[in-house]
Image (tube, coloured by chain):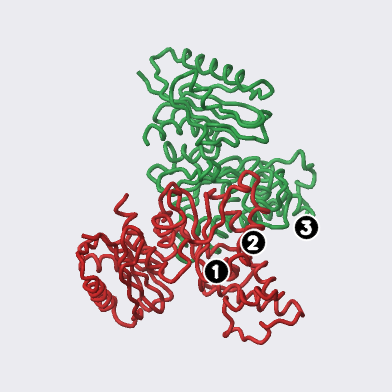
Chain colours: A green, B red
Amino acid sequence: MTEIAVGIDIGGTNTKIGLVNRAGEALASTSLPTNDKVKPESFVETVSDEIRKLVESLEGKLKILGIGIGAPNGNYYHGTIENAVNLKWKGIVPLAGMFKARFNVPVVLTNDANAAAIGEMVYGGAKGMKNFIVITLGTGLGSGIVVNGELVYGHDGFAGEMGHLTVRPYGRLAPTGRKGSLETYVSATGIKRTVFKMLAKYIEDSPLRDVSYNQLTAKMVTEAAQQGDKIALESFEYTGELLGRILSDAAAYLSPEAIFLFGGLAEAGEYLFEPTQRHMEANMLQIFRGKIKLLPSAFNGANAAVLGASALVWKELQD
Amino acid sequence: MTEIAVGIDIGGTNTKIGLVNRAGEALASTSLPTNDKVKPESFVETVSDEIRKLVESLEGKLKILGIGIGAPNGNYYHGTIENAVNLKWKGIVPLAGMFKARFNVPVVLTNDANAAAIGEMVYGGAKGMKNFIVITLGTGLGSGIVVNGELVYGHDGFAGEMGHLTVRPYGRLAPTGRKGSLETYVSATGIKRTVFKMLAKYIEDSPLRDVSYNQLTAKMVTEAAQQGDKIALESFEYTGELLGRILSDAAAYLSPEAIFLFGGLAEAGEYLFEPTQRHMEANMLQIFRGKIKLLPSAFNGANAAVLGASALVWKELQD
C-alpha cells in the first residue's frame, strides 16, 4: 500500500494535480484549464474526477492520506479562497470543505507561496530548518515565511505578503491601486517595467530596443544579460538593489537561516543573485552580516507548485 | 508559600530588580547603578546580594521559580549578552549561566523589547493573543514579535530588530554607521532630530526655537503640541507617517492582531497614535485594513521592564 498526498495548484489559467509520495515524487499528474466561469461545485466535481482517474491509472494499491491545495488568496484557517482578483469566483469559496465532503480525508489550503515554503521544508532545501523565507518570483512576488518550524499565517490567515511591501512611497502603480509595492519592481512583470525605464534612461544600443512591452519576457532580459547588454545588466542591478534592501529588512524582522528564491525570474541565476546578495549584505545590520544564506529553490521546475501543495498534507499529518 | 519570578532589567545606566508574583505584582523592587566597569562576576555577585535582600525584606515564605533578564543584545538561545554597544563588557558574557550557578533555577535572558512583548502577553493587553508586535519607543526603537504564541528569535536569537529597518536609504546617520534606519526617525531621539528639521523648514514662531538640541526632550515636544505649536504638530505628523508606513509593511509580513506602542514617546498619546493609525490604514493592502489594532501598552509606567523580564519566567515554565 503506497501512501500518497494529492497536490492541487489552482492558477488563474490552469489547475495542476499530482499524486505525490512521501519522498516528494509525483507518481502521476495532470493539468486542466481552471474553469472559473462555472460554479465552484462543478469545478470541484471535475477535479475530483481527475484525481480518481489518476489513482486508477497507477493500478496499484494507493491510499490517499490527504489533499493539499495552493490557491490565490487561500485562507489556511478557514480552508477558503477569499476574493481572489485573478479568479472569477466572487466572495468566499469554502473549497477545502467541498473536497473533504468528497474524499473524507484532511484537506489543507493556503496560497501558492505558502505551499512553496512548506514544499521547501518537507522535500527541498529547507529540510531541518526552523526559520526561513521562500520568495516566489512570477507575474507577481509571493512569500512564505517559516518561524520556529511553523508557517506564519498571522491572526487572519493572510500573513506573508512581501510582494505588497512598499519600497517607493510614490512609485509604480500596482493593480491593487497602491503605489511602489515590491512586486511592481521585483517580479517577471517588474523587471519588464524596469527594462523600459532603462531604455528611457540610457542611450546605448540594445536588442531590447526592438521588442515591444507586450512581447518582452523575463527570459529575454536574461538572454540579453548573457550577451553583456547594458540595459539588461542595469535592469538586474536595479532589481537586485531593491530586493537586497528588502531582504536586509527581512533579516531585521525575522533573522532567518536562509532565503530561497523560486520561479521564473530566479532562473536568471547569478544575474539576479549577485546584485541581490551584494545589496543585502551592504545594507544589513552588522550582527546579521554573512550569516543568512541566499539560495535558489530546490524546485525551480515545472511541478513545483503541485509538490508544494502536496507537502501541506505531510506537514499537517506530522503536526 | 508564594511563588515568585525575579525580573532583572539591565540598562546602560541602571539595573532594576523586582520580585513579581504570577499576577504581575511587584512585591519588592530595587534599583542600582549598572556598574559595567567591574567584571561581570562582580556585577552578578552584587545583583545576587540585592535579590537575597529583597527576599528577606518580605519576611514571608517565598519560592523563587526562575529569573528573567532583559538586557541589550541579549541572546535567548545562549543566555548571553553579545557585544552590547551601550555596555562596557566586551565580547560575549554568559550572564544566564552565572545566575543559574548561584540560584539553581531556570534563567531566561533576552533583549528588553522581547521581554516587553512577553510581559504584554503574560500580564498585559496581549493576554490570549497569538500574533502581535510590541514596539518600544525610547532612546532607540526596539521590537518584540510574537507569532503563533511564540516570540520570534530567528535562527540566531537576534530577530525583531525593527529599529534597524531602512526607511530612507540615503537618510539620517545612525550610531551603527548605517543610514536612514527607522529608529533615527521614530524614537525619543528621532523626534528631536525631526523637530530640528522642522525648525529649519518652517518660519513660524515656536517655544521650541528657544531650546538647544541637547536640552530638548520628547516630553517638551508633546507639551508644545498640546499648545497647538506647528513645529511640534508637524514633527508628530512626520513621525506618524514613517511609523504608520512601517506598520503597514509589518502587516504584510505578519498580519498581527494588534500592535502595541510602549515607552516615553508613546506617552504622547493621540499626537502620536492618530497620524500613525491614519498612515498605517492609508498604506495598507486592502485585506488588512481596519483589522489590526494599534494600542498603547498596558505597562506605560516605571516598572514595565522589570515586569517584562519576570514574565519570561512564567512563559518559560508554561512551555
Secondary element type, mark 3: helix
Left or right for B70, reference B140: left
Residue B306: x percent and y percent?
Answer: 37, 68
Q: Nearer the viewer, residue B289 or A45?
A: B289
Residue A66: x percent and y percent?
Answer: 44, 25
Q: Is residue A135 above or below residue A70?
A: below
On residue A201, which mark appears? 3
Determine if marks 3 and 2 fall on one subunit: no
Q: Nearer the viewer, residue B136 or B84?
A: B136
Quadrant where the C terminus of chain A is found in the figure:
top left
Amino acid tagged 2:
Glu
Residue A92 appears in the figure: yes
Q: Nearer the viewer, residue A291 or B133?
A: B133
Q: Is residue A51 above or below residue A14?
A: above
Residue B154 appears in the figure: no
| Mark 2 lies on residue | B274
Amino acid tagged 3:
Lys
Amino acid tagged 1:
Glu
